[in-house]
Image: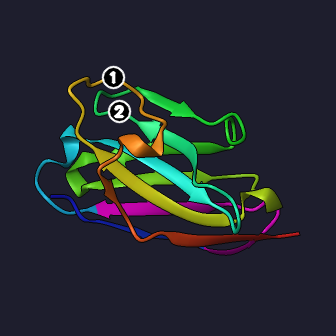
Amino acid sequence: QVQLVESGGGLVQAGGSLRLSCAASGRTFSTYTMGWFRQAPGKEREFVAVIARTPGYTYYADSVKGRFTISRDNAKNTVYLQMNSLKTEDTADYYCAAVALFSGTYLAAAPRLYDYWGQGTQVTVAS
């Protein structure tokens, strides 16, 4: 069982930056693939970024590529999402998720593949 708690959301002007954090419980964090997803009002939850348990394996949605960076600190049981050059269309609730995969390099982008979810943190980008 993994419990995930997101933090770092808030209100920011377009063009600004935020860093989201997701703290995980448990001693096996390093074995999990970690993803970030977001859901805007009236829209379905969508993939943002994923980081595999093998170092160097990351994947991003086209809409955030070049602006967002996902990283993890296994010593702190935490995954981060650095968001730069924010746009109003980035406004959403952001969720982190975890799944234990056999593959250490598979980059899971579908929400249905994840077993554990945080409660979310709200990001609002003002124009």
Left or right: residue 4 versus residue 88 is left
Decide whether the magenta segment is chiefly helix, strand or loop.
Answer: strand
* Residue 96 visible here: yes
Residue 52 % position (x, y)? 35, 33
* Residue at position x 48%, y 50% in the image: 36
Left or right: residue 38 versus residue 42 is left
* Residue 87 visible here: no
Residue 20 % position (x, y)? 50, 62
- The kind of residue on which mark 1 rests is Thr
* Residue at position x 19%, y 39% in the image: 31
Indicate yes or no whether the magenta region holds residue 43: no
Instruction: Give residue 105's mark.
Output: 1
- Cα distance between the residues tagged 1 and 2: 6 Å
Residue 33, by quadrant, is top left
The residue under label 2 is 52
* Residue at position x 28%, y 33% in the image: 53
- The front one of 36 and 9 is 36
* Residue most extreme to the bottom: 11
Residue 61 % position (x, y)? 63, 36
- The kind of residue on which mark 2 rests is Ala
Callout 1 secondary element: loop
* Residue most extreme to the right: 127
What segment carries the magenta color? 10-23
Left or right: residue 126 versus residue 104 is right
